[in-house]
Amino acid sequence: MEDIRDLVAFNVDDGYIEALVRGYKSSLLTSIDYVNLTQCETLEDVRMHLNGTEYSTVLQDEPSPLSPSVIAEKCSAKLVLDFQYIRSQSTYPLTKFLDYLTYPYMIDNLVLLVTGTLHERDIGELLEKCNPLGTFPAMSTLSIVSTPEELYREILIDTPLAPYFAECVSFDDLTERNIEIIRNVLYKAYLEDFYQFCKKIGGTTEKMMCEILQFEADRRTINITLNSLGSKLSREERENLYPSIGSLVPEGTWKLARAEDVQSVHSILESYDLFRRLLQSSADNPGKSLEDAFIEYEVQLSKKTFEQQFHYGVFYGFLKLREQEIRNILWICECISQRHRSGISNYVTIF
Amino acid sequence: MASSGGGGGDRLQVVPSRMTLTQIKGRLSGANKGHSMLKKKSDALTVRLRSILKQVLERKNQSGDLCREALISLAVAKYIVGEEFKVHILENVDKSSLKVSFHSENIAGVTIPLFDKVSMDQDSTEEYEKDTNDGGGVSNQGLSNHQFHSFVSLSGLSKGGQQIATCSENFRKAADNLISLAELQTCFTLLDEAVKVTNRRVNALENVVIPRLENTVAYIISELDELEREEFFRLKLVQNWKERESKSAQEERERLERTSQGFSSFESVPQRVVDGLTLNEEDSDIIF
Amino acid sequence: MQSHTKTKQTKLLSVIGDEDTVCGFLLAGIGEVSQNKETNYFIVKKDTPVSAIEETFKRFTSREDIAVVIINQFVAEKIRELVHSYRAPIPAVLEIPSKDQPYDLSQDSTVKRVRQMLGLGA
C-alpha cells in the first residue's frame, strides 16, 4: 500500500531532486579514475586527473604547492555546496530528512566547541574548523560565549540537538563527564531518533534506511566495545552508549557489554551472519582492519539505495558515497605525498 | 756553543739565577705531566665521541623511518575517522604524559646528562614507567595501550579507535626513539665541546706553555754559562797579565843580573823578584 | 601529581612542525598547556611567517622546562642559520621528516657536524 503511495506521490515533491542526486551519483569517480589517480607521481598530477572529473573546477584556483588536506578540503566544499543546493530545493518531509543527515556533523561541531570553551580556546578559531555541513544558526553568535554554562544556556538549547541534550546530558555532565562519552550519548540519541523518523515516513524509505541505520548502530556498538576494552570505561557506562536499535539488540549488546577481550567479542559476533562475513574478510587480508570491512559494507549499502526508486535513502547513500570518495582521494594524496606506494590501493572503490 | 738559543724564543721575564732555574724546572715538569694527562683525557673523550657519532647517524636514520611510519598511520587514522579528529586532539591537550627526566654519567670528568623517558598516566597518579631503551617489549604493550586511552580521552570510541591507537603507539615509539637520539645528541654536543676545550688546553701546553718554559730554562742555563765563562775569561786574563808581569820581571832580573855581573848594585833587585814571586803564589791560590 | 615520580625534575618535549606532525606527537602524549595558555607545540602553516618560527624556536630553546625540541626538517630549513648556530646541549634540537616534503638527512645540522667530524665531508 505504502509503496504505491510512494510511486504516485513521490515525484510531485521530490522527483527533481532525486534525479539530481542520481545525476551526481553517476559522476562519482570510477575504478578507472582511481587507478589513474594511483599512478600519479605528484599532487600536481592528481590535480590534472581530477580536472577530468566532476572536481574539475575545484582545484583550479589553488596556488601551487598543493597539500592533501587542501585537496580534501576543496572536495568537501564541493560536497557541501551540492548538498546545500539539494536541501534548498527540498520540501517537507525530505527537508527534515536531510536535516537529520546533518546532525552527526552538528554533534561533532558542538562537541568541538564545548571542548574549546572548556579549555577556554578562541572560539573564532574553532568555528573555522567546524564542519560546514553541521552549521547551525546560533553558531555565529558563539563568539560571545565565554563559559560552558553560557554555552549550555544560550546556544545548545537553540540547536536542533537540544532534545538530545535535554534527554541525556545535564549541565553538570558537560563539565564533568568525558566529552567523548557525551558525544556518543548524543549520537546514540540521534540514531534512535532518526530511526523513528524513518519508520514514520514508511515505505521504501523505511526499508532502506532502517537497514542502514541498524548497521550503523551495530557498527557503533561493536566499535565502542572494541575500543573500550582495557580502558577506564565501566561496563555500565559502555552499555549505556549502545544504541537501542540494530540487529545486535538485545542479546548481542547484552553479551558485548560483558565482553572482556577481543577474542570474546569476536566469538559473540560469530553468531551473526553479516559480522562473521566481515570478520572473515578482514582476517583473510592482512592489512585490512575490521574498520575497513565496515566501510566496505557501508559503501555496499549506500550503493544499494540507488537500486530502488522513490525513496529518501538515495540522499543518504549519495552523501556517504561522496564522503567515502573524498576519503579515498585524501588517502591517495597522502600516499603520494608521503611516497607510501605500498599502501596506496587500500581505498574502497565505489563503482 | 748554545749561547744564542736563550734570547731567540718566547720566554718568561725572569732573573737568571740558580734559584729561578729550579723553580722553572719544577713548573716545566708540572706542565709536562698535565699535558700527558690531558692528552689521555682527550683520547678517552674522542674514543667515546667516535662511538657516539656512529650511533647518532644510525639513530637519525631510524628515527626518520619511524616518523614516516607514524605519519602513515596518522593518514590511516585520518582515512577512517576523517580530518576532524586532529582538531579534537589539538583541543584536548592538557598535561603532558610523556616527559623526560635526567641522570648523569661521568666520562673522563665530563658530566653527561642521560635522558629517561617518563610516562605518566593522567588518571592514576601511580603509573610510572622508566625505560631508557625502547626494547621494553611485550610487557610494555599493555601499559602503553592503557595509557593511550586515558590520554586521548576515548577519542575515536565509536570509529577508528584502533587506528588512532596504532597511530598513537607509533608516534610514541617515534618519540621514544627521538628521546634516545636527543640523549646521544646532547652527549655528542657536550663531548664535542669537552674535546675541543681539552684539545685547546693540550695544544696550549704543547705549543705555548711548555716551549716557553723550555726556552726560559735554556735561557737561564745559557745565561749562567755565560756568566761562568765571563768569570773564567776574566780570571784567565788576570792570570795572563800576571804571567806577563812575572815574565817581564824575570827579564828585568836577568837583565839586572847580567848587568850586575858587569856592575855592582846587587842587593836591591833580588828583593823585588822575591816580592813578585810571592804575589804570584798568592794569585795561583785564588785561581785554582 | 608529579611529586610521586621521584623528586627528580622532569622536562617536556616540544614540537615545531606541520599540523599532522604536531597532532601525532600530541597523540603520543607530549603536549602540555600551562596555566597561562603557553603551549609546548607550534603548528607551522603555509602562511606562517618565518619570524614567528624563529621567535618560537628561540622561545622553546630558552625555556627551562624543555629538554627536546622536535622540528620538521622543512621548518628547520626556513631557519637554517638559527638551527645551525644553535649549539647548546639542552634542549636538544632534533630534525625529523615531514609528510609531504622529501627528507634529506645530509641537510640536518647535527648530521652535517657529525659527518664533518668523521671526515666524510660536509
Image (tube, helix red, strand yellow):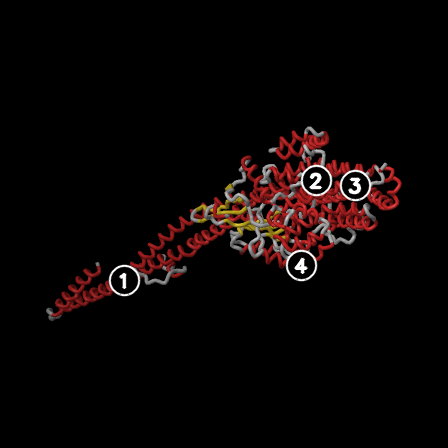
Give the label, 3 or 4, closer to the camera. 3
Relative horizontal placement of residue A68, taking residue B3 as reference (left or right): right
The tag on residue A144 is 4
Question: Do pointers 1 and 2 mark residues of a single chain?
Answer: no
Q: Which residue is mark 1?
A: B231
Secondary structure category for the residue under label 2:
helix
- Numbered label tally: 4
Residues under labels 1 and 4: Cα distance? 105 Å
| Marks 2 and 3, the one that precedes in the sequence | 3
The spot of residue A326 in percent (x, y) is 75, 44
As drawn, the label of residue A341 is 2
Tell which subunit mark 3 falls on: A
Residue topped by disc 3:
A200
Pointers 1 and 4 in contact (CB under 8 A)? no
| Marks 3/1 same chain | no
The picture places residue C22, in percent across and down from the top left corner, at 62, 49
Residue type at tag 3: Lys
Q: Are marks 2 and 3 on the same chain?
A: yes
Query: Can I make out residue A179 in this image?
Result: yes
Q: Quadrant of residue A194?
A: top right
Q: Identify the residue shown where x is 53% and y is 37%.
A: B136
Q: Is residue B205 left or right of residue A76?
A: left
Q: Quote the CA–CA distance across marks 2 and 3.
A: 48 Å
Q: Quadrant of the N terminus of chain B?
A: bottom left
Q: CA distance from mark 1 to mark 2?
A: 95 Å
- Mark 4 vs mark 2: same chain? yes
Closer to the eye: label 1 or 4: 4
Amino acid type shown at disc 4: Ile
Q: Amino acid at mark 2?
A: Arg
Residue C108 visible here: no
